Amino acid sequence: MTNKNAASPDGNLIEHRIEIAFLKNGTEAGRTVVQDGGYFSFQNGDDYFKITVHKVKRSSTEWQLVVYNKGKNMNSILKIGELHGQAGAIWNVKELVPLFDEFKFISVSETPVK
């Protein structure tokens, strides 16, 4: 997997992370922080959901989340949407990840890589 870290103006690499909240019935049920190129996952009975997180382009503020269901639908790859770098973006994921109603994009952070 390609690491899409971008260089800062001083030439150092920057690691990008996105914070996502999981909502159920309008209430926050949890949060995670994921590095560009990373993933988070949930299990629900026989279904195992893996959600990968990618910056679309090195210089872009767009993010892409892709849901994989490794349970009943072993070959299913479902794209749930793209973030555009604005805190507060919300996806309805009830049909994709039935444990939650929505994923909410909280923030993006940039940390210099040492």
Image: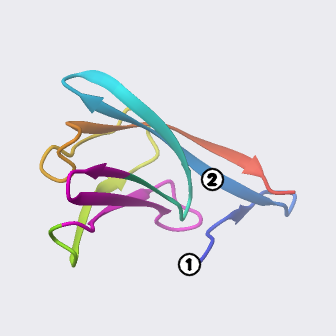
Where is residue 44? Give x, y as percent: 24, 49
Query: What label does residue 102 carry, if any?
Result: none
From the image, tell me which residue sits under label 1: 1
Q: Is residue 89 above or below residue 28?
A: below
Could you tell me the amino acid type at mark 1? Answer: Met
Residue at 27% in and 68% down = 70
Q: Is residue 29 above or below residue 6?
A: above
Occupied quadrant, residue 109: top right
Local SS, label 2: strand
Magenta part of the chain: 42-71
From the image, tell me which residue sits under label 2: 16
Marks 2 and 1, Cα distance to the nearest angstrom? Answer: 15 Å
Indicate yes or no whether the magenta region holds residue 24.
no
Residue at 36% in and 60% down = 50
Mark 2: few/some/many CA within 10 Å (<14, 14-19, 20+): many
**Which of the image's four quarters has the N terminus?**
bottom right
Occupied quadrant, residue 79: bottom left
| Callout count | 2
Could you tell me the amino acid type at mark 2? Answer: His
The answer to whether any part of residue 87 appears in the image is: no
Residue 44 shown left or right of residue 64 in the figure: left
Where is residue 52? Give x, y as percent: 42, 62
- The kind of secondary structure the magenta stretch mainly shows is strand
